[in-house]
Amino acid sequence: MPIIAKMLQQYAEHNNLLSFEGTMETIIPGVYFHRATKSSPRQPLIYNSGIIVVGQGHKIIHFPEHQIKYGEGDYLVLGVPVPLECEAFTDNNLPVMGIAIDINPAMLHKLVNQMMQYQPLSVSSANIGAVQSAKLDCAMEQVTCRLLRVLNNPLEAEVFGEDIVKELVYRVLCGPQGHTLIGLAMHDGHYARIARTLATMHQDYANPITVEGLAEAVNMSVSSFHRAFRQVTFESPLQYLKKVRLAKAKELITTAGSKANEAAFKVGYTSASQFSREFKRHFNKTPSEIQL
């Protein structure tokens, strides 16, 4: 068994998680453990920004014009939250397992500024996508193992956890997908501007939102904004907003017990019938069917 898979299994055993299904935050804030014993079919969901390290199993992310496959020994870098379609697969009947790490913006900016004192860092917006994958190198594997090791010791997690997470982000910055995170720290770059836009959309999705207003807020022309937005998210702004609203509505229906009409209006729809049509088209189920 590969070392990271072995350590994830030890974490599950140590914390009585051998029957756990899903994603949960660990004792280190912003670090999450994921486990799934069954493969899951292709389905729409929203991936949050961060770093995902896979120890066991594999997944395929589907985009309109390409796919990203990642699994054991890979890590995924997501600079911004992205609505996408994903399917997961167990390998050799072993559960899918991995960890996800949130990226603290203040820590990221400090790291990038420190690195720029020793070497020039530049990044072209044309080379940045919202989702990138890479193979774990030796340094990334070692820091991931240290992180998993301290997760089993509350004292060590408190003493060393933040520093290990910081090193992990640094290793990603130094790696082949580091430009995705460097782009976030470049405040005036198109990528960083779109990232700020997405933060606004995820916070204000229930309110009226226009492309013109979003472009103006980040000091871009509508045409440049539209082009940069699609380059980063693979979606138009309005399509992205619709997927965010539908995902939030599904969450309200399945976890809060909201009725379809109530969920529709809470996420910003003004027409219940339009909401039902778009919900069925997106999830391949009606709101009432997912309540069952």
Image (cartoon, rainbow, N blue to C red):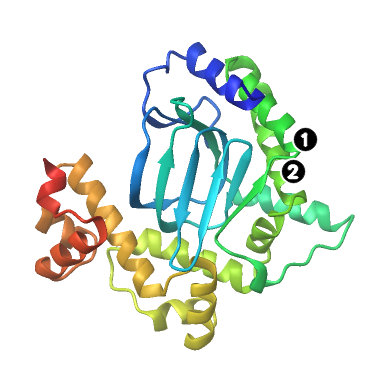
Amino acid type, mark 2: Arg
Query: Residue at the spot x=75%, y=54% of the render?
Result: 112
Nearest to viewer (mark 2 / mark 1): 1
Q: Is residue 94 left or right of residue 219?
A: left
Amino acid type, mark 1: Cys
Q: Position of residue 268 (x, y in %)?
A: 23, 65
Q: Is residue 21 left or right of residue 142?
A: left
Q: Is residue 60 left or right of residue 122?
A: left
Give the labeled residue for mark 2.
171
Q: Position of residue 5 (x, y in %)?
A: 58, 25
Residue 192 vertical placement versus 171 (above, below): below
Query: Residue at the spot x=67%, y=26% of the render?
Result: 145
Q: Position of residue 107 (x, y in %)?
A: 67, 47
Q: CA distance from mark 2 to mark 1?
A: 10 Å
Picture quarter containing residue 168?
Answer: top right
Query: Residue at the spot x=38%, y=67% of the render?
Result: 240
Residue 144 vertical placement versus 88 (above, below): above
